[in-house]
Amino acid sequence: MEFQILLDCLLVILSVVMLWKGADWLVDSAAEIAHSFKISDLIIGLTVVAFGTSAPEFAVTISAAFTNQTDISIGNVIGSNIFNLGFILGGTAIIRPIAVSQKLFNRDGLFLLMSTALIFLLFFGINGWDVNDSFTQIEGFILFSMLIGYIIFLFIKKDPPEEVHPSTATKSSYLFFLIGLILIVSGGHLMVEHASNVARFMGISDWVIAVTIVAAGTSAPEFATSISAALKGRHGIAVGNLIGSDLFNLLGVLGLAGIINPSSISQDIYSSTFVLVLMVGLTLLMMRTFWRISRIEGIILVSINLVRWYYDLSA
C-alpha cells in the first residue's frame, strides 16, 4: 500500500511536468499557426486551444452521461467552469495582471453570460429548483447548436492578428501543437486519477473528491495553458482559452450529455449553477474596469473559489 501511494505521488509530480511542458509548446505553436493564417491570438484561444484543453471535461462528462451518473455529468462541467473563473483566471491575474480587449468583453464575455443564464433558466425556470426539473434532449440540441453557430461566426468574422508577425508556422509548429495537446490531456488524466488515489488514502470521501479534485484536475490543462500564455504576454490566448473553454463545456459538452442521456436535475446542482451565474457576472464586471483584471481582482476571484471549496468540504 505504501509503495502504491508513493507511486501515486510520483505520478502526480510527473503530471505537473507534463502539463507545464505541454502548455509551453501548445501556446508557442498555437500563436505561430494563428499568425500564419492571419488569425488573432484571441480567436485561436477561444477555439482550438480552448477545445483541446477541455478534452478532460469532455471525457469525464460524456462517460458519466453514458453510465447515467447525472450529478457527475453536470456537476463536473459546472464545477470546472467555476474553477476556471475562480482559481485559474484569478490565479493568472495574481501572477500577472491580464489585459482584456473590448471585443472579448462585448462579444465573447456577454455571450458566456447569456449562455450561463440560459442554462440556469432551462434547468430551473424562474421559480428555483423543483423535483420535476429535468434536462431534455431538445435543450441539449439547443445548447449544442449555439456552440456550432458561435464557432462559425468566429471564423467568418475572424479578427486580424494583434501584431504583425511573419508567417512562421512550419510542420514542426503543428507537430509541437499536437504533442503539447497530448501532454496536457494525458497530464490532466494522470493528475485526476492519482491525486484521487492519494485523497482516498487520506480518508477523503468520493463526493468531496468529485467536487474538488476532479473539477480541479480536469481544469489543469486550462490552468497550465493560461499561466504559460500570460507569462509570455499572450493575453488573447490566456483569456480566450478560459472563456472558450467555459463556452465549450456549457454548450458543447453539457449539450451533448443532454442529447445522450436526458435526465432529472438534483437540488445539489441548483446552488452550483447559481454560483456560476454570479461568477460570470462578477468576472465581466472586473473585465470592464479599466479593461484588465488586476492582482486585487484576482485575489477576490481566488478567495471566492476557496470559500466555495470550504463549503463543499464541510457540507
Image (spheres, rainbow, N blue to C red):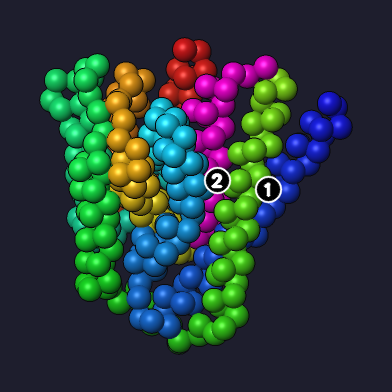
From the viewer's side, name the closer residue of 100 and 66: 66
Q: Secondary structure at mark 2?
A: helix
* Residue drawn 84% across the image and 26% down it: 1
The part of the chain drawn in magenta is 203-229
Q: Which residue is mark 1?
A: 15
Q: Residue at x 66, y 34 (%)?
A: 195
Q: Which residue is mark 2?
A: 220
Q: Main secondary structure of the magenta part?
A: helix
Instruction: Work out which residue is located at the far left of the displayed protein and give it.
Output: 126
Tag 1: Cα neighbours inside 10 Å, few (<14), some, or many (≥20)?
Answer: many
Q: Residue at x 69, y 37 (%)?
A: 194
Q: Nearer the viewer, residue 171 or 164?
A: 171
Kind of residue at badge 1? Ser
Residue 184 visible to an observer of this rendering: yes
Q: Earlier in the sequence, mark 1 or mark 2?
A: 1
Q: Quadrant of residue 34?
A: bottom left
